[in-house]
Image (tube, rainbow, N blue to C red):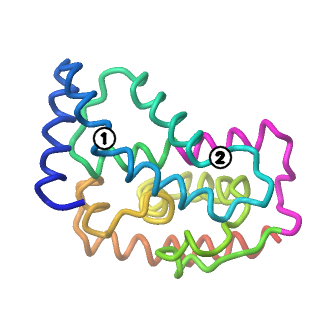
Amino acid sequence: MSLPAAHEVTQLLKAWTAGDEEALDKITPLVYEQLHQLAERYMAGERSGHTLQTTALVNEAYLRLVDCGRVNWQDRAHFFAVSAQLMRRILIDFARSRGYLKRGGAVAHISLEDSPSVSKEPDPDLVTLDDALQALAALDERKSKVVELKFFGGLSMEEIAEVLRISTDTVKRDWKFARLWLLRELGEAN
C-alpha cells in the first residue's frame, strides 16, 4: 500500500471511529485486498482439505471488525494488527471446534527466522503455536504481541513499533528473544 493510501486509510478509520458510517463503505475496498493477502498467509500452510476457505476467513474477520463496536483506531497498522489477531483467533477456534489433535501429528515445522516467507511454507499446528504464544504472553506479553504482529500479521519492525508504541530497536530485541524462546518451546512440544 502506498503512503497516500495508508494516510487515507488512517483518516477513514478515524472518521469511522468518530461515527461516520460512510467511512466504513469507503474503507472497505481500500483494505479488502490486504485482508485477503493476510488470510492467504494464514491459510497457505493449513493442512490439505481444510474446509475453511481464504475468502470465508476474510469475511468472518471483517464481520467481527465491523461488529466490534467503537475501536479507537490509531492507524492502518493498528487496523491490520487487530485483523491479524482476529484471523488467528478464528482459525484457532475453528481448529479446536473440529477436535484436531492438540500436538500435531504430521505437521511440518518451519523456522521462525523464515517468517517473512511464511506464506510459502506450511504453518506449524496453530493450536500448538497458540499454546506456546499464550505461555510466552504469561512470561512477557509484549514479546508475544511482537511475534503475533510479525509472524501472523506480516507487519514490519517499524509498523510493530508504531502499533506497540516502542522503539524499533526494542521490537528487534523482543523478536530475537521471542523467536529463540518459541523455538525451544515448540521443540519440546514434539
Q: Name the residue at 56% across, 78% down.
A: 180
In the figure, residue 66 lies in which quadrant?
top left
Residue 12 lies, in percent from the top left, at: 17, 35
Residue 81 lies, in percent from the top left, at: 38, 50
Task: Find out whether the residues at labels 2 and 1 contact each other: C-beta distance under 8 Å.
Answer: no
Q: Name the residue at 29% across, 54% down.
A: 164
Judge by depth and name the residue closer to the eye, 4 or 145: 4
In the figure, residue 25 lies in which quadrant?
top left
Q: Amino acid at mark 2?
A: Gln
Q: What residue is pinned by disc 1?
A: 29
Mark 2 or 1 closer to N-term?
Answer: 1
Task: For label 2, count other residues whose C-alpha is less than 10 Å away and answer few (under 14), some (14-19) or many (20+).
Answer: few
The secondary structure type at the circle numbered 2 is loop
User: On screen, 145 above or below 185?
Assistant: above
Write the start and end of the magenta stretch as one range: 87-106
Q: What residue is pinned by disc 2?
A: 53
Checking the image for residue 88, the label placed there is none
Residue 89 lies, in percent from the top left, at: 59, 42
Q: Amino acid at mark 1?
A: Pro
Which residue is the extreme one toward the front?
29
* Residue 92 is covered by the magenta coloring: yes
Residue 65 lies, in percent from the top left, at: 41, 31
